[in-house]
Image (cartoon, rainbow, N blue to C red):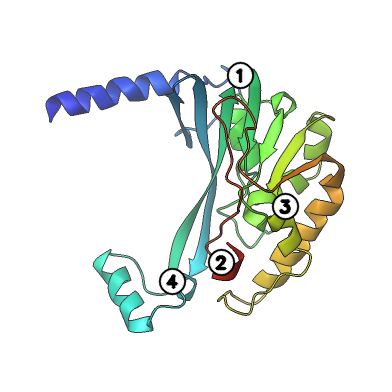
Amino acid sequence: MTQMIRNTQQETNMNVNITPPPASSKADELVPSRYALRIGEIDVLVVSDGVLTLPGAMLAHNAEPAVRAAWLNDNFLPPDAFDWALNVVVVRSGGQTILIDAGIGGEFPDLPRAGRWAQRLEAAGIDLASVTDVVLTHMHMDHVGGLLVDGVKDQLRPDLRIHVAAAEVKFWESPDFSRVSMPPGFPDALRDTAKRFVKEYRSQLRLFEEEYEVAPAATPPGTAWSAWRPAATG
């Protein structure tokens, strides 16, 4: 056990040093909301975009309420709401800097614990101008919203490539929410954000049907996934 703790501490020290924050960053935090690791020849940095508090009914909404309530109770979680952690990932591989998802952005003031994407990337020493590629797991507002924040597009490279599954873009042309459980306002927010994103970045989209390589050892899946998406869509 002692050796395991020592090894973990050594790994943590090594990981934190992969992407050091700027010495005088105004956005730096008392407790950095990020962690880093190295996988083979690629560097990976996970950055928190904050926390989204969602109604408990959205968790396993097709489960019997009593079963869900018992599971939440067994895990010492409140029955009426749960915290959904939001993260973005920065990958450095083969001379490329790849951003995986882009957070929720700043258009939802009633979600005060989320939308920390830009300031936490800055605190981690990540310059948006250095990002060569963006990979979107899917196009929910908490994955594309950061790209719609005022001034962000101006900081990005004009030749930025945004990789997203063709099936995902197709889904958002006419999304079906008939088999999901969401609070009032969420479907409209999801639909509107996805459409705005496609309109804003259409010329930079790189659609794919199957698995393919974005950079050495960085291969996104050919289909998207989502906790709220109907099962028939992936």
Question: Can you identify the residue that label 1 sits on?
Answer: 94
- Above or below for 61 versus 9: below
x then y, percent, for residue 213: 62, 33
Q: Give the residue type at disc 2.
A: Trp
Q: What is the CA distance from the residue labelled 4 to the residue labelled 2?
A: 9 Å
Instruction: Kindly report the distance in space between the C-alpha atoms of the residues bearing marks 4 and 1.
Output: 39 Å
Q: Please state which of the two labelled residues, at mark 3 or mark 1, is closer to the viewer.
A: 3
Q: What residue would you read off at disc 2?
A: 228
Residue at 51% in and 30% down: 45
Q: Secondary structure at mark 2?
A: loop
Foreground pick, 121 / 156: 156
Q: Residue at x 45, y 69 (%)?
A: 59
Q: Earlier in the sequence, mark 3 or mark 1?
A: 1
In the rendered image, the quadrant that contains the C terminus is bottom right
Disc 2/disc 1 C-alpha distance (Å)? 34 Å
Structural crowding at the residue carrying mark 3, measured as other residues with C-alpha within 10 Å and reported as few (<14), some (14–19) or many (≥20):
some
Please report whichever mark, 4 or 1, sits nearer to the chain's N-terminal start.
4
Tell me which amino acid carries mark 1. Gly
Which quarter of the rendered picture does the N terminus lie within?
A: top left
Residue 19 drawn at (x, y percent): 52, 21
